[in-house]
Image (cartoon, helix red, strand yellow):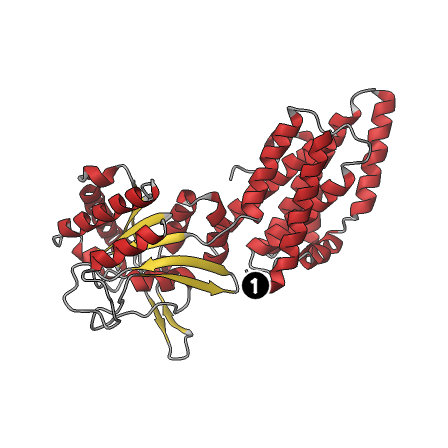
Amino acid sequence: MAATNEPTFQEISETIRRLEEMLERVPDPLARDIRQKISHLRALLLEQRSPNLVLVGRRGSGKSSLINALFGARVAEVGHVKAQTGQGRWFDVQGELGTLSILDTRGIQEGSRPEEADAADTPLDSILAEVRRKAPDALLFLVKATEVDAAIDADLDVLAQIVSAVEQAHGLRPPLIGVATHCDLLEPKRTDLHLSEQQDPAELQEKLRHVEAVERQLREKLRSREDLRGELVTVLGLSAYLSFRPDGTIRSDERWRLGELAQVLFRELPEQGRLVLARVTRVRALQEELAITLTRAMASLCMGFAVVPIPVADIIPITSAQVSLIAGIAWISGRQLDFQAARDFLPALGVNVGAAFALRETARALVKFVFPGAGNVVSGAVAFAGTVALGTAARAWFLRGVSAEEARQLYASTRASAEAHPDRALPQA
C-alpha cells in the first residue's frame, strides 16, 4: 500500500484496538458478539491482500488479453505471432487503485518456444513451479470460443495436474472457472456483443445462442472429469478485446461480460482479497456490495457499543467507527484512504456528529427517567439507525455521485426507516 495511505490504516487500526480494549468491561455474551463483528471489520479493512489468480490455457486463448481487460490497461504483452509469455510468473500489478497478483502461464500445447526466456523444460513444469510457490485463490481455464471442441482433453489433463499439485503443496483445491474467450468472433461476426442495444435483435439473439452453445460444450467437458468436477464453479463466455495505441491509451474497447467474471471471482475469493478486486476492476456492483457489507457490520458494532452499560463511554468508539465507515466506502470508490473524505462528506450531509450524540444522550436520559431500564435499548436503536443512514448516504455520494441535497434526503429517510424497521434497514448484499 502506498505510503500516503499508511496514517489512515494506522488510525483505523488504533480505533479497532480501542474498541477491543473497551470490551474488557463488557459482559459476555455481548462482548463475544461484538468481538466477532470487530474481527469481520479487521478482515475487510486491515487484512486485505492481493487476490492470487492463475490463468491457464493454450497459446491464443487470450490469457494476457484477459489480464489487460481486468485492469483496463496494458499490463501484459499479447503475442500476435509467436508464443509471447515465457516462464510462468506471478505479476504483481500495482496502480493507484490497488494490486492483483496474477500468474500468466506459458501456453500449453504451444507450437514454438516463447519469445521470453524460460528455464523450465515444459509449460507444465513452469506452471507447477509457481503454484507450488504460492497458493492460488482461483484457477481460470481459458479456451478460445472457436476451439472448445478442438482436442482440449490434453489441456484438461494439464489442468487436473495443476489442481493436484496445489492440493499437495497447500492442502486445498482452488475453485475452477471455465472461460470461453473471443466470443466476439462467433457468427454473425459483425454483430457487436458489447454494443447489444445497437444491434439487430434477431442477429444478436443468434450470436447469444452460439455463446450459450460454447458455454454448454465447455461445461460438459469440465464436468466429464471426475478430477475437476468438484472444483468447477461456473463457465462463462466473454470478450476481452482491448486495443492500445503506442502511448498506452485505449484505441478500441470491445470488452463484454468482464463485470460478470469479476462478480464470480468476488464470490470465490477469501474475504481479505475481495475489497482489492472490487477497487481494481471498478465493477460498481461489487463496490456496492462491499459498501453494504461494511455498513451492516459497522452498524451492528455501533449498536452493540450503544447498549454497553458504561455512561457515555460509547460516544468515542461510535464516532470513530462511523468516520472509519465513511473513509472505507470512499476508499472502495477509488479515493485515497484518508479521513479527509469523511471531513468533506459530513458537512455536505449537514450532520453535526457532536450535536447528534448530545441529543442521543439527552434522549437516553429522558427514556431512563420515564421508562427505567429502557434507555440502552433506545440508544442502541438510534446508533444503529444513524450508522446505517451514514453508510447509505456515503454509498450514494462516493459510488453513484449523487448531489449533496440528494445525499441529505437519503440520510434522513434512511435513518427514519431504520429506526422504524431495523430488520429492513439495508438490502441484502
Is residue 79 shown to the viewer in this render?
yes
Residue at the disc numbered 1: 2
The residue at the point 68 percent across, 41 percent down is 387
The answer to which image quadrant residue 8 occupies is: bottom right
Residue furthest to the bottom:
246
* Along the line of sight, the residue nearer the viewer: 422 or 369: 369
Query: In this rendering, is residue 327 above or below 426?
Result: below
| Tag count | 1
x and y, in percent, of residue 314 in the image: 76, 36
Instruction: From the viewer's perspective, tell me whether residue 10 is left or right of residue 112.
Output: right
| Element under disc 1 | loop
The residue at the point 42 percent across, 64 percent down is 72
What amino acid is labelled 1 in the image?
Ala
* Along the line of sight, the residue nearer the viewer: 394 or 113: 113
* Along the line of sight, the residue nearer the viewer: 409 or 168: 168
Looking at the figure, which quarter contains the N terminus? Answer: bottom right
Residue furthest to the top:
372
x and y, in percent, of residue 17 in the image: 67, 43
x and y, in percent, of residue 68 in the image: 37, 64
x and y, in percent, of residue 151 in the image: 12, 53
The residue at the point 17 percent across, 48 percent down is 157
Instruction: From the viewer's perspective, tell me whether residue 78 is left or right of residue 45.
Output: left
Q: Residues within 10 Å of mark 1 (few under 14, many from 20)?
A: few
Is residue 187 shown to the viewer in this render?
no
The residue at the point 65 percent across, 49 percent down is 12
Query: In this rendering, is residue 295 above or below 128?
Result: above
* Along the line of sight, the residue nearer the viewer: 286 or 266: 266
